[in-house]
Amino acid sequence: MTGNAVLVGVIIITLPFLVHYFRAAQRGIKKSKRTSAERSAVSSALAQALPDSVFFGPHLVFVESIQSYWAMQERDIVPQCIVRPRTAEEAAIAVTILKRDYDERISHGQSPLLLAVRSGGHSPIPGAANISGGIVIDLRLLSTVVTSNDRSSVSIGTGARWLDVSKTLDKVGLAVAGGRNSAVGVGGLTLGGGLSFFSPRVGFVCNNILSYEIVLANGTLATASESINPGLWRALKGGSNNFGIVTKFVARSFPSTNIWGGFLYMTSSKVSQLIDAFHRFTESKPGVYDEYAAGPLNMEYCEGSLPYQCHERAGFVQSIRVAVRDSSDLLGTFFADSWHRQKFVTTTVKNHHATLVEIHALFERSVEALLRVNGMIWTLVLQALLPASAMKGQLDSQGLSTRTEPLVVVLFTAVWKNKADDLLVEQITRNMIDSIDLYAASRGAADPYRYLNNCASWQNPFDGYGAENKRFLQQMSRTYDPDGLFQKAFEGGFKLDMESFRP
């Protein structure tokens, strides 16, 4: 590629004790033009039952909640009111009231009032954690992080962000399998499976959750663990927000002290060598693959910028340093809170060298079309996913236990400024995924798995889990949410297509 700069970075680092997180630097954010929506009887009932936890516009708490979403698309949305429960019991009261309203509307043949639930609010999908004219349950006050007396587990509030978790555990020399970006909320990432820098050692984030505290559709506060509601426990490991509102996770912890890590940047002249190295690294056999090594290969186009300028624009700070630090310090090396529009889209391929080369070639060719998009930062990320890693920890619902070949999770991220470019970005990203999938299928390198947390709104991760796992999730939805509150009213996120379910 010529003209504008392409940044190629590889993070393949052997760590004696690995825990990487990223902290968002604070940026200015735009205020929504609208600050309130019309109230309904149910929002008034919520305010009466929870007077200190329900907020309407233009209250400062209401405005701050909207402005705190990561992607501008979510900030464009104005709900009717925001419920900020201070305890799990308050969340249960809110769900009880909302379920009563849902039942009444359905019994009269009406459409349900639309609802949303948020943890960190880091999804770039419009409506994933916010809802126009509806009611949002904002869980960010449920953010405590408490280690057990025997140091074997950590209780984590669903509204915590991974920086909160890291800071607490650094003080006591512990870690958990957790997110790789400090701005991400614990709840959404964990319920979507969760890739971690610890994943080569311990599996997905969800594979290390010992128990869940969850508000079910009927307003009951329940526990899901290996011995209590075990089906629900497994369903929550990759099943997203389809079964209730999780208020707390208990995660397995392990010792971790200072680590060695950071970023290595190279120009596009090294891309062939880096793809070769990534392919060999991912192909390593059990016993050879270093499970203390982790990190994706990033390839990045940034409009009109040199590599270091590109990362400054994206909000990176101190990001060209590789050093020994504690995990909270390393959290400060990645990703700022966004003030732009955002998009993720993903696919999965086998670790097939020609396919990886073609993916990069498609990435480069797409830049010409993106030159029309103001402020574009366009990134390709390749993440190794080995069968041995996918099978570690407890059984989940993602359907990867049958894989015998190394996989590569492919992620494209787009950052841009103007709403007018939304449709063009959507078309380009869809075309990219279609082209990759066609090429991979022609080489026998395709795989149906789609990592839920990287999916675009038009993708269906549950189909990629396989028919048996999808049916299992549908059965758990029917068992724990028989009236479909979390399928029909909580429409954000990825739903289970219950119309196709046959008991």
Image (cartoon, rainbow, N blue to C red):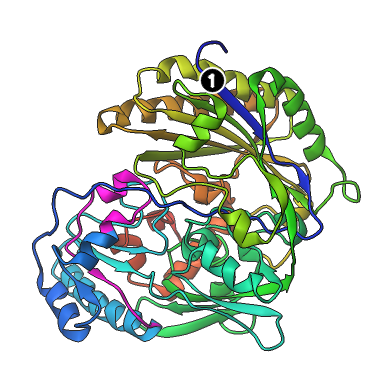
Q: Which residues are magenta?
A: 66-87
Q: Is residue 267 magenta?
A: no
Counting from the top left corner in percent of width and height, residue 444 is at: 70, 28
Q: Residue furthest bottom?
A: 149
Residue under the image location 45 percent in, 47 percent down: 336
Task: Count the numbered circles shown.
Answer: 1
Residue under the image location 71 percent in, 21 percent down: 270
Q: Residue furthest right?
A: 287
Residue under the image location 21 percent in, 75 percent down: 54
- The amino acid type found where label 1 is placed reads Ala
Instruction: List the residue tagged with mark 1.
Output: 5
The quadrant holding residue 441 is top right
The quadrant holding residue 151 is bottom right
Q: Nearer the viewer, residue 461 or 123?
A: 123
Counting from the top left corner in percent of width and height, residue 469 is at: 58, 58
Q: Quadrant of the N terminus?
A: top right
